[in-house]
Amino acid sequence: MLETLKFYMNFPFVRYALIVGVLIALCSSLLGVTLVLKRFSFIGDGLSHVAFGAMAIASVVNLTNKMYLVLPVTIVCAILLLKTGQNAKIKGDAAIAMISVGALAFGYLLMNLFPTSSNISGDVCSTLFGSTSILTLTIRDVWLCVVLSIAVLVIYVLFYNKIFAVTFDEDFARSAGTRADRYNLLIAVVIAVIIVLAMNLVGSLLISALVIFPALSAMRLFHSFLKVTICSAVLSVICSLLGILISILWGTPVGSTIVAVDVVAFAICWVIGALAGKRG
């Protein structure tokens, strides 16, 4: 098995997949803790469907780089979700359901009305569940992921204290002079960037799992925000690496394999947390 891995590591596409997988896992896990604690976990699912709709439009108009359309559309919808979710008439979960289902249906309709290839089902499946092969990542994808991931990490580190305050007690943060709306907006924009980055790796339907599972797993082991965040990041990176390596060795879909490893990790953490609780 080690010899097989060494052999595959000689190929650039394997190294690309590992780099992108680690960066996306790291970024998504950091914001995942905040989203889970704010009970806004499904924003990842909603935005992933929006990204799918934008991807369909980009394919129909034959954009060379679909990211020029998908990224701004997803960011705008993240802002709309935040604003609409604060509306007393339309709650956050209803707003996510409206936008996500509408975008998913609109995107699939466009792909059928204006097909860009003879294999529509294959294109839809690849977009929804991630690339079936790690051969699809290019050096351009890698550099784009590196630049945006560094930006996300820098923003998170610089505004860690503000994000912490807004996550736990938004009203107190406002009373202390923190502009909570501004930092909620920042969180929404950053998570939109992460969603778009992750589409090539795990697909639009599996992105929310990449955001939620590491955070939930870490919460079974620790209780402080900092420890949960660090543990979530470590677990997410390990699960991503294992998922990619397993997919290389056994030829399984990358996205589904990563999520499956995340589910197993959550089960292990749940058992460890339950045993530790009984001992305590």
Image (spheres, rainbow, N blue to C red):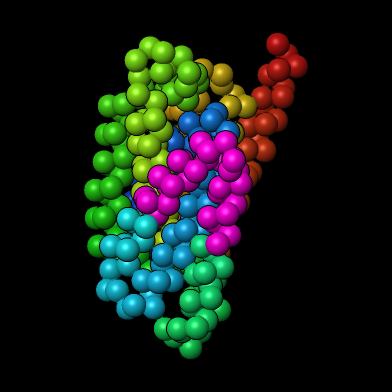
> Residue, x 41% and y 13% (percent of image)?
175
Residue 83 in the figure: left or right of residue 39: left
Question: What is the span of residues highlighted in magenta in the rendered image?
Answer: 74-102
- Front in this rendered view, residue 247 or 79: 79
Residue 76 is one of the magenta-drawn residues? yes
Instruction: Say if 183 sits above or below 206 in the image.
Output: above
Q: Toward which corner of the image does residue 25 lie, by quadrant? A: top left
* Rendering coords of residue 89 (x, y %): 59, 40
Main SS class of the magenta portion in the image: helix
* Rendering coords of residue 163 (x, y %): 39, 26
Quadrant where the C terminus lies? top right
- Front in this rendered view, residue 168 or 179: 179
Q: Toward which corner of the image does residue 17 lie, by quadrant? A: bottom left
Asked if residue 262 shows in the view, the reply is: no
Instruction: Say if 64 sits above or below 101 in the image.
Output: below
Q: Residue furthest right?
A: 278
Residue 248 is one of the magenta-drawn residues? no
Asked if residue 273 shows in the view, the reply is: yes
Instruction: Say if 23 sits above or below 37 in the image.
Output: below
